Image (cartoon, coloured by chain):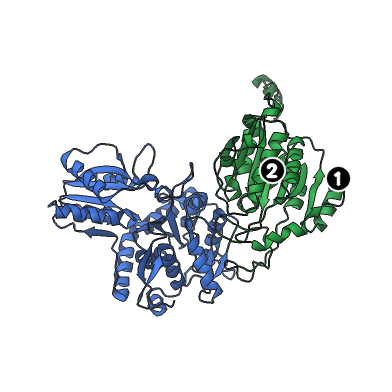
Chain colours: A blue, B green
Amino acid sequence: MSPGNDAVLLTGNHAVAWGARLARPKVVPVYPITPQTPILELLTEFQAQGELEAEIITPESEHSVMAACIAASLGGVRVFTATASQGLMLMHELLHYASGARAPIVMANVNRTIASPWGFWPDQTDSVAQRDTGWIQFYVESAQEGLDTVLQAFRIAERVRLPVMINLDAFYVSHSLEPVRVPPQALADEYLPPYAPEHYLDPARGESWGNVVTQEMYWRHRRDIGGAMDAVPEVAAEADREWQRLSGRGWDLVERYRCEGADLVVLTMGSMCGTAREAVDELRDAGHAAGLLKVRLFRPLPAAELRRALAGVRDVLVLDRNFSPGAGGVLHQELRAALYGTAAAPRVHGALAGVGGVNVPPAKIAELAGRARSSEPLPEAVWAR
Amino acid sequence: MSTASAAAITPQSFKSGVKPVWCPGCGDYSVLSSITKALAALGLAPENAAIVSGIGCSSRIPAYTSCYGFHGVHGRALPAATGLKIARPDLTVIVAGGDGDGYSIGGNHFLHACRRNVDLTYVVMDNHVYGMTKGQPSPTTEPDWDSKLAPGGTGLREFHPLVIALASGANFIARAFSGDPNGTADLIAQAVRHPGFSFIEVLSPCVTYRPEQRGWKDAVRPASVAVTDDPARAARRLMTDDGFNLGVLYAGRRAPYRAAPQHEPQSPASLELDFAL
């Protein structure tokens, strides 16, 4: 197939690979892991056909992959990689390093359960557990959104000089075939000009990275990362607006679905949004004022936008397809923190819904919503399936 | 060793009843069979043995046996097995895995397991490919192996596991072929009996991604020279080896790892003596 404006059937993984191809990365270090491997396979195929001018390297582990990504990125070229689950866990040390080095790497992560025990099911614990690593994080619901978000991610990463992780749920998104519009290369090029960083490892200039620093320098460096993170909601919103102008598709940082006049809002991220849309439709059909807030940008959490979107809402039902033992659902915790102390904050109800990939049908979400309306929120999230 | 009567223990005693999900024709079926034969021949009972693995097709083995099993994370079978053997020296600990788990992501642990020389038996089912993720080149893949995922080949020199094991201090080094399950069982039994870290490289064809490996049955042969305990001789042999000589290629005499001797703790007063003016 060739890029154009006609819709073609692509899996989430292949859509992400197309997004990466259109971004013209120069180095792609990657290690195979289920369910991410089809991304690697398609990129390899593009390269073999001469359609992707990138060096694809397959280091001996994901830890080495991220080490290679960082160094390649600091060399001044665009870098893409993809992983899942245990691979992301193994990268953890270098995820911190990548943001500290201000390397604008873009990585797709296919959300999969983490061991032990072994499983291959959709579960976002792998990536929410990386929330303190200094990576910007997106969660996508569809293949098209995956493709578009890869391009947006490079634009954002290179502007704020922080790495971006795009998360797509195992199988529900990664392996489902959906109609996808692959934009022409010229459009992608217009949106994403060649990467030309101000600073990169250049022997002629003798700059270096990662040196031992004083407390004062370390403190300043961390504060600067914080400043870059603070700028992300505005930069990401601009990136989305510009993409919408060029491609006709925008995704927002927080999508409001049928939230007009809603007294109950379901809030979740990733593939669960598709199920929640159906639940909201059913609730609306039954005469209930229900809506969905889809959190697309999770790190940094767009707190101001969430507060605005939830103004006047009585109950929020947070669905977490992740589990932090001892804390519950991560999105539930983060939303409560974002709303704490605000005037007339909604009641926040948490459900651990779909942990380990278990099915949560729309009727279950409607049932949880009904319970949220009629009872005070519990301090802990409830287990749901 | 088991107190169970030898007559009651058969290779079948070591099978779990869980049906393997390997591809039809995979070499790993017969390696599983060889491991169970070896354990029965050693007179062990299932509760006397543990099988530790990492990730990959071959690393599924623990679930298919009735021994103690541990299916750990990718590449880390050897450190887990080391911990187990040190905590429970009475257990026979077999570590199983493939060339991806053992030589790439776990390569560093392979070096140090050989060096540490804990009494483990490491069975690597080598098919020169990442099978579980559907056919990427592994460290033992030939540099010119042309495939969809490595068009034109990797161009990278193969890892030579036996040479590396010898250089790193493994105390027993053998090569087996899955197409000879009795010979493989015998080598595994010898490896378990030999003290210290024993390494068996089993050529185990991947019929799905490397169908040409069916030809290995015509390439393998018993090694034409007797086993040596001289590392220098073994090094010369292994460096000139074509990869198809079967049998015990080195059986060393290094003393296996022992837990550090327990000294009487020094008193603070005796420590201070060293600093006395």
Q: Quadrant of residue A189?
A: bottom left
Residue on which the image places disc 1? B228
Q: Position of residue A221 (x, y in %)?
A: 44, 54
Q: Quadrant of residue B185?
A: top right
**Crowding at mark 1 (Cα within 10 Å: few <14, some 14-19, many 20+):** some
Can residue A158 be seen at all in this image of the molecule? Answer: no
Q: Amino acid at mark 1?
A: Thr
- The residue shown at (48%, 63%) is A39
Mark 1 belongs to chain: B
Classify residue B62 as left or right of residue B271.
Answer: left
Residue B3, compared with residue A332, is above or below; it is above
Q: Position of residue B105 (x, y in %)?
A: 60, 52
- The residue shown at (41%, 56%) is A171
Q: Secondary structure at mark 2?
A: helix
- The residue shown at (68%, 58%) is B140
Q: Amino acid at mark 2?
A: Ser
Residue B116, compared with residue B271, is above or below; it is below
Nearest the viewer among B37 and B242 is B37
Q: Secondary structure at mark 1?
A: loop
Residue on which the image places disc 2? B34
Nearest the viewer among A101 and A283 is A283
Classify residue B6 as left or right of residue A209.
Answer: right
Q: Position of residue A7 (x, y in %)?
A: 35, 73
Nearest the viewer among A10 and A152 is A10
- Between circles 1 and 2, the one closer to the viewer is 2
Nearest the viewer among A160 and B108 is B108
In the rendered view of the protein, which quadrant contains the N terminus of chain B?
top right
Q: Earlier in the sequence, mark 1 or mark 2?
A: 2
**Crowding at mark 2 (Cα within 10 Å: few <14, some 14-19, many 20+):** many
Mark 2 belongs to chain: B
